[in-house]
Image: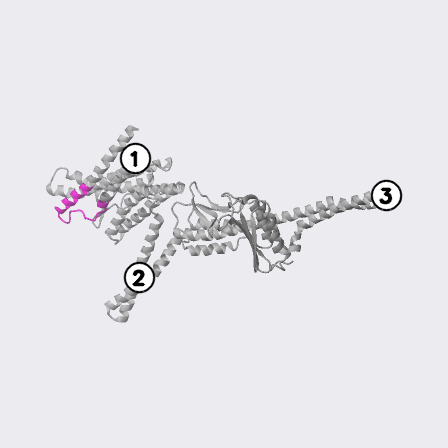
Amino acid sequence: MVETAEHDRGAGRVAFPLALGAVLLVAASLYIGTRLPEDRRMVWWHPEILVALAWTPVGAVLVRHRRGLTVAWLMLGSGFSAALYVLSLNLGPWFELHDWTGTGFVQWLATWLWAIDTYALTLVLPLIFPDGRLVSRWFRPVLVLACLVPVIVCVHLTIDPDVRRWHNGVSVYPFDEIPVAITAIIVATLAAALLSLAVRFVQAPPDVRRQIGWVVYPGVLAEGIIYAGENGPIGDPLRNITIVAVPICIAIAITRYRLYDIDLVVSRTLVYAGLVVVITGVYFALVGAASLLAHGEGTIAGLAGAIVAGAVFEPVRRRLQRTVDGFIHGERDPYRIADRLNRRLQTAADAAAALAVAAEVARSALHATGARIEVLDRDGRTISAEDGVLGTRPQLIPLVWHGEPVGRLLFGVTRTPDARLSGILARNLAELANAARLSADVQRSRERILRTREEERRRLRRDLHDGLGPTLASLAMTVDAARITLKTDPEAVDALLENLRATMGRTIGDIRDLVYGLRPPALDDLGLEGAIQALGGVVATGDGPKVDVHVDGDLKGLPAAAEVAAYRIVQEALTNVHRHAKAGSAVVRLHLNGDLHVTVDDDGVGLPSQVRSGIGMSSMRERAAELGGSCTVGPGPQGGTLVRASLPVNGVHP
């Protein structure tokens, strides 16, 4: 390990002198060029100058950042080779003018040395980027060919140096004039190298894909501009800018690929390139039309063209940006996404299908590998729907509805999503999560209501069949026995009648209990207000809390179902206050305003931090749900617990 650290420090000490040496070689070449005739010197915009001055320092920086990085050493060596080539281009004519020894050797280097950096960067770099290893052992022959191409070019140009052509002072190795075998080797190697990069992109995780994107985008752009520059009138400055951009993008890909978004770079490039084309076309079309109308008024024509081109700039930019974003990312307008989500939700059959649709839309909108929506119901159970694959480290957005957490959105992405988009999407999903939670609550309430009703019917049947039925049969038998005994032993009838009277009393009590279970008698005797006041008086006896009852509105004539629901909710709430709240007082309020609003507020210890719905709380919600209303239990405004129920009465019949 010590030897490795020493080796890395030694490599770091070599990198920057090499980069400085490349810069000095270029400076020496340019100085020598000032001493040469204009027709013999190298052109100052030669692309190898940019390779030497850009790729070598960037390679040195990357070596300093990661000393064992093969890609960085390849960049460093290629840039230094380019610097030697730049020096030989001016040094060869200088030697020739002074008849110095070694002229032939220097001119020979100036003939082919460019092949090292050219083919190392175009053939070898795609094979080993970004980790310095081949994507598969099947590409080893391709790497060997890529390393042999400079040797093949050197041999060919040594044998036939006149095959080179010149374009704007830059030598060109024309594929249409060199042997077909050499062309085939170079093209096949390049195709295999690009295939290797494509295979790596498909197999790689998202981070490596972003690194590859940072290199492929400027690399393809640079190759296209260089090819166009060699075969058309494209400007040399634009070509040189792309040559400089490639190593910068490689540095970003290796060191800062998480900080900058390659998709944004591609998007902006396409948008502003399209703007240049559109605005230029509009300008010249209007200038031409105005010139025809103004008959030689060039100033007016130019002004008209500039004004109209400026007027269409922003609308065209917005339209192009939307089109490009749609091509790269899909839809990015949050309001369009919200509209699409709402339209898709209208076709969902139930809450589970709606959550599945929402997960699919969220994954597409956030450009995520996967998305999952989790909804937490009031009983602590989770309802979820997932689309795609989340990955190992998903991001999380809480779903909050009216200040209450109702769920969360989990999604796996390779970059941070747009905050505005994710915020609007989260608000829409929070509405959906709350609706799904309410739907689940309603469904469970219906199931509980049905189950409770059937259990109540079973209890009534059992009580009537097993209790009241045998008792009445016993009474009938006792009456018959009394009639028979009356004829034979009149004195014994009195005992039978006394037993009959006691049995009838117990039967009346059982019937009263059954009736009370169906509807509290106090509601018929005292009305809802009086029944609840009586209930409060019972709770306040002994060590119970003081109960105050406040009524707003005329409660006479309420539907029977609403009266029973209100009474049972208050009864259960006051029972909880007495048993659990440790309260000194409680206030019951009944307010009739279209619906019957019932609240029970106490000054006790309040709800625990981890509250779960028990039988009593579930019963209150179910009784409200039976009428189409709602019941919530939460912290009170002054501490303690607040039970709030809303019971519709207009649609409920007595």
Which residue of the protein is positioned furthest toward the front in this rendering?
542
Q: Is residue 64 left or right of residue 399?
A: left
Q: Nearer the viewer, residue 300 or 354?
A: 354
Q: Which residues are magenta?
A: 23-50
The colour mode here is one colour
Say which amino acid is labelled 1: Gly
What is the three-letter code of the residue carrying label 2? Answer: Gly
Q: For the residue carrying disc 2, how many other residues have a C-alpha within 10 Å: few (<14), some (14-19), or many (20+)?
A: few
Q: CA distance from mark 2 to mark 3?
A: 127 Å
From the image, tell me which residue sits under label 1.
68
Q: Nearer the viewer, mark 3 or mark 1?
A: 3
Q: Quadrant of residue 652?
A: bottom right
Sequence order check: which comes first, mark 3 or mark 1? 1
Res. 281 mark: 2
Give the image quarter of residue 110. Answer: top left
Residue at 67 percent of width and 51 percent of height: 518
